[in-house]
Amino acid sequence: MPSSALRPGAADALLFDLGRVVIDIDFVQVVSRWAAHAGCPPEQIAARFVRDEIYHGHERGTVSDAAFFANLRQQLGIDITDAQFLEGWNAIFVGAMPGIAALLARAAEKLPLYAFSNTNQPHIDHFSPVYADLLGHFREIFLSSSIGLRKPDAEAYDHVVKAIGVPAERIVFFDDLSENIDGARASGLRAVLVRSTDDVAAAMAALGI
């Protein structure tokens, strides 16, 4: 949805993805750490990494950390410890998205803010304290591994909309992935594809925030 389709008063709540919308992530950092531990080229790991059903299950909270790392060990063909996998896995977070803190603070004065992210327990344990101030702008944070549902499944959006307690069409959702935007729109939410913080700023301006 382009910002031009939004109007002041068109939203009762704002819903934000976390990765690359609120918190910047860089998977290159993960691959580099794993490659250093394994003593192999990063390109080898990057070429073999697949977001398969084990990955998705880990995000839904149905696959344990140990099982996830064991699958990675086989998938990537590297023999590193769970602790080394975890260290690299959490290196993905590289800071707040530029300018997002001020936008969230301003928006929170006008509307309730919520977050909805596909993520896993190790990442939650890592980013929750590190970005506590930034995440403090949200009234509630819906995490796939906690609710057992992940984007872009319709059931996931329905769960979040029901929990927020306002009609789907009165929620503006921000995400950086087209498939999640499509899923949100199919579930009735207004959705904005985020390529940079400028897209969030433009949408807020259109909403009169």
Image: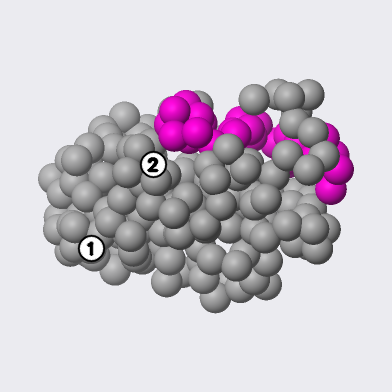
Q: What kind of residue is marked 2?
A: Lys
Distance, label 1 to label 2, CA atoms, is: 20 Å
Residue 4: give x, y in percent of width and height: 78, 24
Residue bearing the label numbered 2: 151
* Residues packed near mark 2 inside 10 Å, few (<14), some (14 to 19) or many (20 plus): some
Residue found 44% across the figure and 34% down from its top: 187
Q: Which mark is residue 65?
A: 1
- Which residue is found at the position 48% from the left and 42% from the top? 28
Which stretch appears magenta? 181-209
**Where's residue 115, x and y in %?**
55, 56
Note whether residue 101 is visible.
no
- Residue at image point 44% right, 28% down: 186
Q: Quadrant of residue 205?
A: top right
Left or right: residue 82 versus residue 185 is left
**Is 31 situated left or right of 81 in this image?**
right
Mark in front: 1 vs 2: 2
* Element marked by disc 1: helix
Occupied quadrant, residue 53: top left
Say if the magenta span includes residue 191: yes
Residue at image coords 62%, 64%: 138
Does residue 67 lie above or below 182 as drawn? below
Res 121 visible = yes
Residue 86 is left or right of residue 71, and the answer is right
Residue 56 is situated, as x and y percent measured from the top left of the image, at 26, 45
Q: Which image quarter holds the N terminus?
A: top right
Which one is in front, 24 or 163?
A: 163
Among the two numbered marks 1 and 2 on one chain, the one whose residue lies closer to the N terminus? 1
Q: In this rendering, is residue 174 above or below 101?
A: above
- Residue type at mark 1 is Asp
Q: For label 1, count other residues whose C-alpha is less than 10 Å away and answer few (under 14), some (14-19) or many (20+).
A: some
Query: Is residue 165 located in the magenta-colored stretch of the structure?
Result: no
